[in-house]
Amino acid sequence: MDPLALSHVLLISLVFSAMLVGLVGLIIPVYPGLNIIWIAALIYAIIDGFNWPAWLYFAFITLLMFIGNLADNYFINARARRTGASWLAIGIGYIAGIVGTFIIPLLGGLLFSILGVLIVELIRKKDWKIAWVTTKEMALGFGWAVAVRIGIGAIMIGIWLLWAFTNR
């Protein structure tokens, strides 16, 4: 096999592997999987070159990354705020989620986020039922956010695959 073709196959394999790591990581609430997919696409573009239409593919991937990150925050916060969650509870939930990710990898972030919101809302409202409704809505928001992020991440990878295999 031609050394240039072999190096291109190696590049595609490494970038695709990094993108899959980003995609699988999207199930973890604080994991920046969309950013990892975007960085992998950027590395591919730098190595392979920003020719026509490579920059267009990369622009779509960039736009999707921004939309995905905004949607993530929207789904989580909107559901919690709709039931009266305070910004303090949401902030504590985010901080607890980051800490939880390091204490219990994979599910610790989600578990600690939910517990953080529940505890703050329980202290704030002094009503278990109201605190639980708010916490449940935030957890549902996490679920929707994960689903949307995974969908957007898959589309980003699909666009990159189209780019990698048609832009030769």
Image (spheres, rainbow, N blue to C red):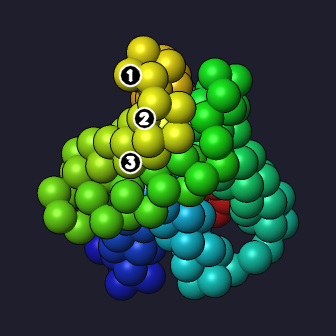
Instruction: Work out how far the residue at label 1 is from the one at label 3, CA to CA, in angstroms.
Output: 14 Å
Q: The C terminus lies in which quarter of the figure?
A: bottom right
Kindly tell me whether residue 25 is visible in this rendering: no
Instruction: Work out how far the residue at label 1 is from the one at label 2, CA to CA, in angstroms.
Output: 6 Å
- Residue 145 image label: none
Amino acid bearing label 3: Gly
Mark with earlier residue (1, 3): 3
Mark with earlier residue (1, 2): 2
Disc 1 is placed on an element classified as helix
Q: Say if mark 1 contacts mark 2, CB within 8 Å.
A: yes
Residue lying at the far left of the rendered structure:
104
**Picture coordinates of residue 124 (x, y %)?**
52, 40
The residue wearing badge 3 is 116
Amino acid bearing label 1: Trp
Amino acid bearing label 2: Leu
Mark 1 nearby-residue class (10 Å; few <14, some 14–19, many ≥20): few
- Residue 128 image label: 1
Residue drawn at x 55%, y 78% as measured from the top left? 43
Disc 2 is placed on an element classified as helix
The residue wearing badge 2 is 122
Q: Is residue 72 left or right of residue 112?
A: right
Circle 3 or circle 2, nearest the eye: 2
Circle 1 or circle 3, nearest the eye: 1
Q: Is residue 115 left or right of residue 59?
A: left
Q: Is residue 28 left or right of residue 156?
A: left
